[in-house]
Amino acid sequence: MKKPLIITGTDTDIGKTYCTLKIINLLKQEGLQVASMKPVATGCTISSAGLRNHDALQLQRAANIQLPYEWVNPYAFEPPIAPHIAANIVCQEIDIEHIYVNYLKVAQQADIVVIEGIGGWCVPFNPLDSLKDLALYLGGQVILVVGLRLGCINHALLTAERIQQDGLPLIGWIANHIDPQFTAQTTVLSLRERINAPLLASIPYQAHAQPAEAIMFSELLMKTIHSVAL
């Protein structure tokens, strides 16, 4: 069983899902059976089937192994707030062992499982655990998505340092341009000099992305994806 690939970010709303979907597609191009999970999600909507999260549904559809939604997203909460607070509101506790049991069921059917975190690396799940504890439990390898905007250097350096201090392999990071007014070139250079992991891709702001840039993104990331797939 391959180690899961865990996608985390410097913050919320910085493009983790976009990057995770791209990674899933690249893994499928390698001929792998790919499953996806978003173990904890907030901001879910009520449907006839129960609470559903838009990002988790995208991940479920992108994978080439189709699984029950409850395996993909074991913990779904309606309020768009931090997960431990959302869980408290409904008198529920997020149990990483329960997530692990779901992961084992998913992993038995896949060559590799791609897991998208919620918020940032240290966002609490419960009084004791956060994404980093789940990642340690799963023995995952981590890709960090950096949302390029004002203040991201501090967030990125602290997150990268913490991932490595926690004893998990940070196999690379992705620079995602999320603010069209932000001049990102010097920021990316500063981060490349300071993060002890390779820059896998620098994604242009999506409203102005050119096809050639998207191809470059795929080629740059493919090298790491290929090594993960082996």
Image: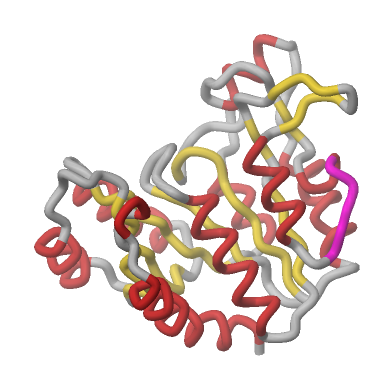
Colour scheme used in the picture?
A: secondary structure
Q: Along the line of sight, which residue is nearer the eye, 81 or 207? A: 207
Q: How many marks?
A: 0
Residue 20: % across, % down: 56, 59
Q: Is residue 96 above or below residue 148?
A: above
Image side of residue 50 versus residue 8, left or right: right
Q: Is residue 25 above or below residue 91?
A: below
Q: Along the line of sight, which residue is nearer the eye, 139 or 76? A: 76
Asked where in the image residue 211 lies, by quadrant, the reply is bottom left
Q: Which residues are magenta?
A: 65-69
Residue at 69% across / 52% down in the picture?
59
Residue 67 on the magenta segment: yes
Residue at 43% across / 50% down in the picture?
9
Residue 213: % across, % down: 34, 73
Q: Along the line of sight, which residue is nearer the eye, 83 or 12? A: 12
Residue 182: % across, % down: 16, 47
Asked where in the image residue 229 lies, by quadrant, the reply is bottom right
Q: Is residue 222 above or below residue 50?
A: below
Residue 111: % across, % down: 79, 76
The majority secondary structure of the magenta stretch comes to: loop
Asked where in the image residue 194 lies, by quadrant, the reply is bottom left
Quarter of the figure that contains the N terminus: bottom right
Quarter of the figure that contains the C terminus: bottom right
Q: Along the line of sight, which residue is nearer the eye, 127 or 113? A: 113
Residue at 68% across / 72% down in the picture?
3
Residue at 63% across / 70% down in the picture?
25
Image side of residue 127 versus residue 45, left or right: left
Residue 174 on the magenta segment: no
